[in-house]
Amino acid sequence: MEAWDWTLVGKIAWVIFILIWGGIRWRPNVRARRNPIKTSHRSMKERVLLAISFAGLGLLPGIWVFSGFPDRYDHSAHPAVVIFGAILLVLCLVLFRLTHKALGVMWSNTLELRKGHKLITTSVYKRVRHPMYSAFWLWAVAQPFVLANWIAGFSGIVGFGLLYFLRVGDEEKVMEKEFGEEYEIYKQQTKRIIPGIY
Ligand code: SAH
């Protein structure tokens, strides 16, 4: 058998992943825009964090995938490593789809509450408060496995890590303010990202 170019396989896996991810997010995004917002916390901090996260998970890896820049940080790709990364990406997509299904119109890409916002505590929200962030962590962690470049690989962990750690506390405060005791109880029954652990 001809030797495969595993760097290329990894790049193709990442591009397919991005396309499917976009397909999952498309409709919730359209619907969310139609749904009136009650309280918005779209601050400057939020905007900057979203931009940094986008750079790490999408822009820098995209530039490397399509142009090869910065190629001086390329490293070799091993089949098992790339396959492991691709499996993580598949898990990410499955979880991502489930979180959108569960949140429905309550979803927003920033800290906003809709008119008639309800606290979702079912499906993937039963044991974890931030399963969509769990899905993003899977993406960020998968990226260095599928992309054989130090910058394009690790930019996601840095970019999404900043968004996550600087946002999750604010998000919980907003939810606490809105849902009070209901959220307090929910907090006691759940973890943030990993069921039973963290
Ligand atoms: N942190 C969550 C959701 C991210 S989307 C997760 O990782 O799965 C952010 C939006 O979801 C915010 O507008 C917030 O109001 C809303 N949200 C977060 N958790 C929610 C829940 N359990 N029920 C309803 N809406 C929620």
Image (cartoon, rainbow, N blue to C red):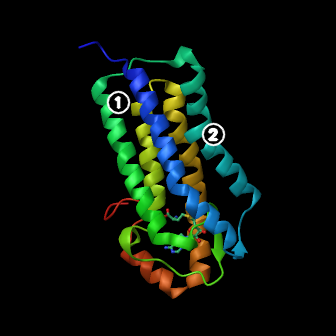
Question: Residue 154's spot in the image, x, y percent?
Answer: 50, 34
Type of amino acid at the residue the image marks with label 2:
Ala
On the image, numbered disc 1 is attached to which residue? 82
* Residue under the point 46% across and 28% down: 11
143 sits left or right of 28 in the view: left
Disc 1: residue Cβ within 8 A of ligand 1's nearest atom:
no
Location of residue 163 in the rendering, given as x and y in whole percent from the top left corner: 59, 52
Taking depth in this image into account, of 114 and 138 the one nearest to the observer is: 114
User: Could you classify mark 1 by the number of other residues whose Cα lies within 10 Å: few (under 14), some (14-19), or many (20 or more)?
Assistant: many
Identify which amino acid the numbered label 1 is placed on. Val
Please provide percent x and percent y for residue 157.
50, 41
The answer to which of 104 and 54 lies nearer the viewer is 104
Q: Can residue 16 be seen in this view?
A: yes
Residue 55's disc number: 2
Which quadrant of the structure image shows residue 188? bottom left
Circles 2, 1 touching at the beta carbon (< 8 Å): no
Report the residue at 43% width, 83% height from top.
Answer: 185
* Image x and y of residue 166, in percent: 60, 55
Report helix, strand or loop for mark 2: helix
Question: Looking at the picture, does residue 33 appear above or below residue 144?
Answer: below
Numbered badge on residue 160 = none
Location of ligand 1 given as a quarter of the image: bottom right
Return the disc, 2 or 1, that comes first in the chain's sequence.
2
**Residue at horizontal 52%, vertical 18%?**
73
Question: Is label 1 in a helix, a strand or a loop?
Answer: helix
Asked whether residue 130 appears in the rendered view, the answer is no
